[in-house]
Amino acid sequence: MSFSNDSKQKLTAIAAVIILLLLATNAVLLYNNYQKSDTIETQEAELVETKKLRGELEKLHYAAQEEIEAMKGENEEINALVDTQKDELSKANKRITALLSGGKKTKRELNEIRAMVEDMRSQRDQYLAELTTMREENEQLTAANSQLSEEKENLTTQVVEERQMNDELTTARAALMSEKDELTSRNTDLSATVVRASVVDIRDLSVSGWKVRGSGKAVKKKFAKNVDRLKVCFTAEPNDVAQSGKEDFHVRLISPQGETLASESMGSGVFTTTEAQEQMRFTHIKTVDYNNTEDAVSCFLWEPGVEFTKGTYTVEVYNKGYLTGANTFKLK
């Protein structure tokens, strides 16, 4: 069987078309297979990335929990902050875990989740920095408080020691004062004894009445109306304890009415007795040059310029505040 040229040409054209169609079909199939292969590779990469992120997240979460938990100690404020930060990180971990387990993720979603993981890591670092700073400050405060407590304890010990020392000093001072008072009392007694021992006694104490005549001659009288002056005389006894020198004798002339004859213009005054510490008026003070030997009689005249009353008079002589002699005399 023979074909014409036209028929051959038609068959050739048809065959060419079929070949072209087959080539096109193969190209499409090849392209589709390439696209599917690329998609599979992308999905596999996304699954790997998702798994990697999940592992990083889990590792980050547990590590962060342990690191922050390690910051706990005896400070309640720091412990409370640790619990708060752990709770915040747990919430962030749950949010990211929920996103990772929500089905197939695109590259954009995975990038967003990775950014959240990095934020969580930054949040952990920030929490650790805050806790570190807070713990360092707390340690500084603890050290300062410890130093203050030590200083307070030292001050307390010093105060106790000083108080004890003050008590001891007070006790010692009281003992010294007691000894001083005792010594003072002894010295006073001794001084009083010495003074008493040094008192110069007198003897031959006498008082006589005298009248001065017109001629100026003084004569002795016994009647009060005729007497215008009294003459007092005494002799100082020797005393080995008394020192030589001026000795004062306070003389009291006491009237029959019990009053001390006195006139300030004539040297009268007041003295204090040594034993009774009693103030007494005296009539006259007689100063004697005492040399601790038998002396001549010491006399003085009392001429007040007034009339004397009759009766019995008393005369007393004091040396160093002690009564050393007394006598009576009578004017008729």
Image (spheres, rainbow, N blue to C red):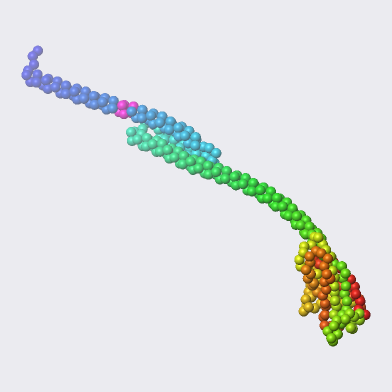
Report if residue 156 lies within the magenta region: no
Look at the picture and state if 156 lies above or below 121: below
Look at the picture and state if 64 lies above or below 171: above
Viewer-closest of 52 and 59: 59
Look at the picture and state if 40 lies above or below 179: above
Q: Residue at position x 85%, y 81% from top?
A: 218
Q: Position of residue 234 (x, y in %)?
A: 85, 70
Q: Which residues are magenta?
A: 39-44
Quadrant of the image containing the N terminus = top left
Q: Quadrant of residue 54?
A: top left
Furthest-bottom residue in this view = 214
Instruction: Name the dominant secondary structure of the magenta segment.
Output: helix
Determine whether, in the image, residue 254 is placed left or right of residue 75.
right
Determine whether, in the image, residue 241 is placed left or right of residue 226.
left
Viewer-closest of 235 and 128: 235
Viewer-closest of 324 and 234: 234
Q: Residue at position x 79%, y 62% from top?
A: 242
Q: Residue at position x 64%, y 48% from top?
A: 162
